[in-house]
Image (cartoon, rainbow, N blue to C red):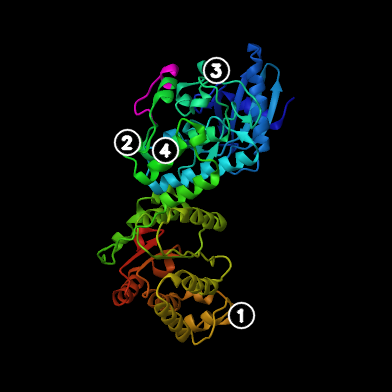
Amino acid sequence: MNSEHLQIVKELLHSKISLQNHSYPEYYRIYNNKLKVSYLVKILDNSTQQYNLLLQLQKEYQYLQELSNCEYIVKPIELIIDNNSTYLIMEDPGGLLLNHYIPAKGLQANDAFHIIQQILNALKFFNKAEIIHKLINPYNILIQPSDASIRIFNFQLSAKVNKKKPADNIEKIYPEYIQYFPPEQTGKTNITIDFRSDYYSFGMCILKLLCGHTIFSTPIKDRFDIVTYILSCEINPYFFTNLGIENKYANILNKLLTKDKEDRYPNFVEIEKDLHTAFHKKSRTSVNIEIPNFSPDLSILTEKYYNFGTVSVTYTKAVRTVGKQNIPFLLYVNGSPSYGKSSFIEELRKSSSYIKNELFSMYCYEDRFEYKPFIGISKLLHSLFSTLQHISKSKYNELVENIKNLFHINHLDYSYYEAQLFFPKAKKKNNSYLGKIRDNKSIYIEGYIKILELLGNLEYIVICTLDNIHWGDKETAEIIQNILLKSNSKILFILSFNPDQV
C-alpha cells in the first residue's frame, strides 16, 4: 500500500531526527521546510519478526484513533505496512519534549499549573474512552514553548480498563520511564492496574514540574534499583516538604503517589478540586506597591518577550507575568492583532488560567477589520458591573451612578450611546461608525480619558493596547499620565506591542 503521506515520509527519511524519548521503536520527526510538511513517524522493521511490537503498533494506532477528538494528543494519520516496514504516521504538532522544557529547579507554580491542568484534562478524556495510558511522563509529552500547550503521545503500552494484561517486562523498558511507574506496574506486586495507576504517574509529573526531578533526586540507571526504591520509599507529606515543596502541594502529591492505590484519589473530581484550591489559593494579606513613575520602563514586561515575534505570544507572556502578582486588578485589552484575531483571543483566554487575582476581567475587541470600537467600550463597562460586585454595595452603586451620569443614559447596550458620548465628532453611516475615528487620534484619546477616569475607582489597573496609534507616543502618554496621577489607582501597566514607543 502506498499513500501520499507515506511517499513523502520515504522521500524525507534521510532527514529524520529522533525525538530521543527513549521509545522503541523510536519516534522520528520528519519535515521539509520547502514542502511545509512535518510528521511524527514510528517505523518498525518487519524483518526482525518481532510480532509483539507489530501488535503494539497496531494497538497504539487503534487507541490514537479512539482518542482523535482529544485536543491533548498527537493526531494519527495512518498505519501502513509497506514491504519490510510498518509505518505509524502522525501529525507533528511541533514543540519539544516536556522533559527538555522543565528547568533544573522546576517551573513557577502558575506555569506548572497550566501544564498540569492540560495533562489532567487529557487523562479525563482517556478515562471516558476507558484507556489507561501507562506511560504518562515528560518524555512522552510535547510542549509548545510559545503558549505551553501540550500533546501526549506514545500509547505503546496502553490498555483497556478491565482487560487482564500481564505485567510489562521492565527489562525491555527504559529506566527513564520506570521512575514514573506506580508499584503495581513494576511487575513486583499482585495488584491490578487501573486508572489510579495513571494518577500515580500524573503525580510524579507534577513533582517534576514543581521541583525539577521526581522522587529520584539523582539519576538511577539500573532498572531493578529503581523498582526497589519505588517499593521501599516512604511517601508522606514530609517527604515532599523536605524537597522544598509547599504543604498545599505536598498534600496532593501524597494522595497521588501513595504506594497503595486504594489510598489514592478515587476520581478526577477530587483531584481537580484540590489542585484548583492549592494553585489558586488567594492571600488575604494586603499588598503595598509603590506607584512607579509613568515611563518607558513600564513596557519591560513585553520587551522581555518581544523576540518571540508574534503578538499573541508577547501578550500571553506579559499577561502571565502580571498575573503572578497577588493583587486585584482589571485587565482591559483593546485593539486587534494582525497575526490572526481568533488565535490571539484564544491565547489570552488560555493565559487567563494563570491569573490568580481577586479582580480579573478581560475583553478584547476587534476593530482593525470590522470597525467596532464602541462595542468594546460598552462591553468593558458591562465587565465592570460584573467584576466589581465583590466590593461594598455602596461603592458599587456609586460607580454605577457615575457611569450612568457620565453617559446620560439609564442603561447600557451595544449600539450607539458610547459613540455619541465618547466620540462626538464621529459621523454615523449605515447604522455604524466608521473610518474617520481611526484617522483622528484626539477623538480616540478623548474617549479613553473618560474610561480612565472611571477606572480610577479601581485599586489596580492593567491596560494592554495593540494599536500604537492610541497611545504609542509621548503626547498620548503625557495625557494619560496626568489622568492617572489624579486617580485613586495604585498601579498601572500599559503594555504596548512595541516597547520603544511607549
Q: Residues within 10 Å of mark 4 (few under 14, many from 20)?
A: many
Front-most of residues 70 and 90: 70
- Alpha carbons under labels 1 and 3: distance apart: 74 Å
Q: Which residue is mark 4?
A: 254
Q: Which residue is mark 2?
A: 243
Mark earlier in primary sequence (1, 2): 2
The amino acid beneath tag 4 is: Asn
The kind of secondary structure element at disc 3 is loop
Contact, CB < 8 Å: mark 1 with mark 3? Answer: no
Q: Which residues are magenta?
A: 215-226
- Alpha carbons under labels 2 and 3: distance apart: 31 Å
Is residue 47 in the magenta section? no
The amino acid beneath tag 2 is: Leu
- Alpha carbons under labels 4 and 1: distance apart: 64 Å
Q: Which residue is mark 3?
A: 169
Apparent side of residue 186 relative to residue 75 in the rendered image (left or right): left
The amino acid beneath tag 1 is: Lys
Front-most of residues 259 and 327: 259
The kind of secondary structure element at disc 2 is loop
The structure residue drawn at horizontal position 55% and vertical position 42%, both measured from the top left corner, is 267
- In the displayed structure, 181 sits above or below 49; it is below
- In the displayed structure, 46 sits above or below 295; it is above
Is residue 220 in the magenta section? yes
Q: Nearer the viewer, mark 1 or mark 3?
A: 3
The structure residue drawn at horizontal position 63% and vertical position 26%, both measured from the top left corner, is 11
The kind of secondary structure element at disc 4 is helix
The kind of secondary structure element at disc 1 is strand
The image position of residue 234, as x and y in percent, is 38, 29
Apparent side of residue 90 relative to residue 457 in the rendered image (left or right): right
